[in-house]
Image: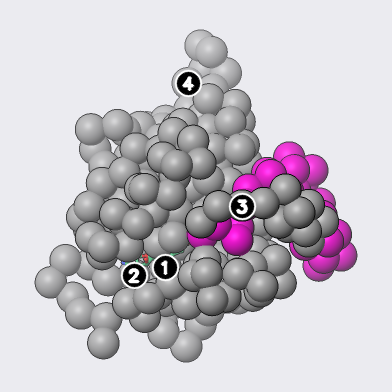
Amino acid sequence: MVATPSDDRKYRHRREQLVDTLRSRGIHDERVLAAVGAVPRHAFVDPALRERAYTDEALPIGLNQTISQPFTVAYQTALLEVGPDDRILEVGTGSGYQAAVLCEMGARVFSIERHEDLLARARRLLDEIGYDVRTRHGDGTKGWPAFAPYDGIVVTAGAPTIPESLLRQLREPTEEDGRRGGRLVIPIGGRGGQTMTRVARTGSGPHDYEREEFHSFRFVPLVSEGGDDS
Ligand code: SAH
């Protein structure tokens, strides 16, 4: 794909309109809006769907998976409260779009995907555009202990319950340097719909977590090892 300058202009204009749409739908975090305004979403969708890349909708990316709706990406990113240089783990790389948005937020991004071919495609694209994301093929419900603890973990598929390993890989708050505890943002529920949930680590103990619930969404299912997504 060779982008022409007029393509660039066209997509840039549409991207600005998308940002306005997100603002009107309730996203007020200016850093998140700027990140969405910077990522070329059209590069992350199938060429046949490129004309719809900047409408606020989820689109198929193959293997029964979708690139999330921009509103959803912005909503989850805002709930993560990403600070500069935060280490963020994403479960469900999919197209790579959410990972790119996190890079634009200044985070150090780690991302896991269970479908090897989706991951290969996302990997190529992120490299091509120049987004520095560490990726791994595997079951993200186990997290990625090698790079823990994380300031934020975002799960981009619907989970029946909160995976324990993810909670354990959140950063503990530290008093000495005033660092906050890590946040897990995860849609919890069955296949029909999930409640966006945020769990923040408030201490080092096994019960030092605070849970908040937000709006309902509908994600593709989180499939742990041995599961099937048919
Ligand atoms: N964040 C993606 C959205 C992808 S949809 C984007 O921006 O495009 C959710 C993704 O989660 C799918 O690609 C699916 O294959 C993946 N997934 C589901 N269960 C998983 C698991 N246990 N570990 C890692 N990835 C998983």
Q: Amino acid at mark 4?
A: Thr
Give me the disc on residue 3. 3
Say whether mark 2 is within 8 Å of ligand 1.
Answer: yes
**Res 201 visible:** no
Using the image as rendered, state which of residue 229 and residue 127 is in the foreground: 127
118 lies left or right of 142: right
In the displayed structure, would residue 86 be above or below residue 223?
above
Q: Amino acid at mark 3?
A: Ala
Q: Give the magenta-colored segment's residue range.
A: 16-44
Q: What residue does disc 2 label?
A: 222
Q: What residue does disc 4 label?
A: 174
Q: What residue does disc 1 label?
A: 157
For the residues carrying marks 4 and 2, which lies nearer the camera in this image?
2
Using the image as rendered, state which of residue 215 and residue 115 is in the foreground: 115
Q: Secondary structure at mark 4?
A: loop
- Specify the quadrant of the image occupied by residue 203: top left
Label 1 to label 3, Cα distance in Å? 31 Å
- Specify the quadrant of the image occupied by residue 205: top left
Label 4 to label 2, Cα distance in Å? 31 Å
Q: Quadrant of the C terminus?
A: bottom left
Q: Secondary structure at mark 2?
A: loop
Say whether mark 3 is within 8 Å of ligand 1.
Answer: no
Are the residues at dot 3 and dot 2 in contact (C-beta closer than 8 Å)?
Answer: no
Q: Earlier in the sequence, mark 1 or mark 3?
A: 3
Are the residues at dot 1 and dot 2 in contact (C-beta closer than 8 Å)?
Answer: yes
Using the image as rendered, state which of residue 158 and residue 213 is in the foreground: 158
Q: Could you tell me which residue is drawn at 35 percent across and 32 percent down?
A: 149
Callout 4 crowding tier (Cα within 10 Å): few <14, some 14–19, many ≥20: few
Q: Could you tell me which residue is drawn at 60 percent across and 69 percent down?
A: 50
Q: Amino acid at mark 1?
A: Ala
For the residues carrying marks 3 and 2, which lies nearer the camera in this image?
3
